[in-house]
Image: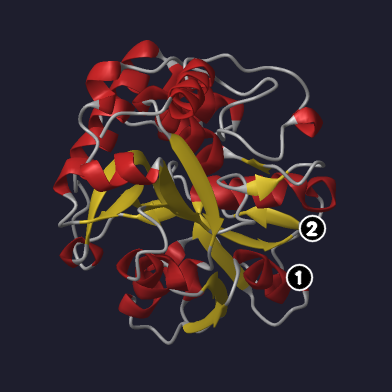
Amino acid sequence: MKKTPLLLAATAALALVLTGCSGGDSAEQPAAGPNIPTGDEISTTADPALTALLPEDIVKNGKIGIAIDIPFPPMAMYDEHNREVGFDPELGRLLGQKLGIDVSLNKQAFDSVIPALQAGKSDMIMSGMNDTTERQQTLSFVDYSRGGFAIAVKSGNEVGITTQDDLCGKTVSVQKATIQGDLLRAMDCDVTVMELPSDLDAQTALRAGKSQAYVADAVVAEYVVATTDDGKAFEIVRDPENPAGFNPVYSGIGILKENTELVEAVRAALQALIEEGTYQEVLDRNHIGAYAVEAAEINQGKDA
């Protein structure tokens, strides 16, 4: 079917903005139009060879739907203009820009992101999700970070937790449906795992004394400790035998495993961002540069 002149004009306009023409204050972001980097966010240019890898249904729809759990800083949060910022939204926009297609950031509770994909509400997950063999039964992961989990306690550490083993017999708060809950239960030493709907709920439980420790991905826990009450509310348990965190795992972009064309398109786009350096810039911008991967690979997560 031939495109009408109006459609051709709209397509040309979309192509122009997707090549990296961004700037201005995020408060000036138009209500409608492509969701691309703006202000001081990291930007890139579209690669037609990568656009050609996109599956036909994505091209027809004109955008990639990304399920994101917000807030989950530093992975995802809102700025003062209610714009989605943090590693996942910013990398998601950058991937869309490199692929030459718009993205839709769809707020979704973490424990429902996989059902959202299965129901066709989104096309992929960017929510700091750990790559596990169990999840690989449903998803393929384009891995984008590697790190362990960290333990936070109230400032002063009156409970005396200095290693992972010290969690035995304690109540530990975590976000529901995260791998940390599984790892704690696998310790099999009377850890009471308090699973709560959001990561903020898990932090609040520690603050209120309902749990003796809070466990999350190291990048998240470090951010929480540094920013809550100007760093005075909590402290990280520093185990010298695990300087990068406990049980390091890969995290990545989750896509239904049958969507092989989209998996390869996203993998190739991430590899391009790694090679040009913009991927590292997004990590550094969000203070998690130490957790970078060297190459875009699929399903590197393995069970211990």
Task: Indicate the quadrant where residue 291 lies.
Answer: top left
Looking at the rendered structure, the secondary structure element under dot 2 is loop
Quarter of the rendering occupied by the C terminus: bottom left
Q: Residue at x 30, y 27 (%)?
A: 269
Looking at the rendered structure, the secondary structure element under dot 1 is helix
Q: How many marks?
A: 2
Residue 209 vs residue 200, the one in the foreground: 200
User: What amino acid does circle 2 point to?
Assistant: Ala
Contact flag, marks 2 and 1 (Cβ < 8 Å):
yes
- Report the disc number at residue 221: none
User: What amino acid does circle 1 point to?
Assistant: Arg
Q: Is residue 77 visible?
A: yes
Q: Residue at x 61, y 57 (%)?
A: 70
Per the model, the C-alpha gap separating discs 2 and 1 is 8 Å
Task: Indicate the quadrant where residue 31 lies.
Answer: top right
Above or below, 46 against 51 in this view is above
Quarter of the rendering occupied by the N terminus: top left
Q: Is residue 238 visible?
A: no
Above or below, 196 against 236 in this view is below
Mark 2 or 1 closer to N-term? 1
Label 2 crowd bin: few (<14), some (14–19), many (20+), radius 10 Å: some
Q: Position of residue 205 (x, y in %)?
A: 69, 76
Q: Residue at x 40, y 40 (%)?
A: 62
Residue 233 vs residue 50, the one in the foreground: 50
Q: Position of residue 141 (x, y in %)?
A: 26, 49
Q: Position of residue 67 (x, y in %)?
A: 46, 56
- Report the disc number at residue 233: 2
Give the residue pinned by disc 1: 207
Q: Residue at x 45, y 72 (%)?
A: 112
Task: Indicate the quadrant where residue 46 lies.
Answer: top left
Residue 61 vs residue 172, the one in the foreground: 61
Label 1 crowd bin: few (<14), some (14–19), many (20+), radius 10 Å: some
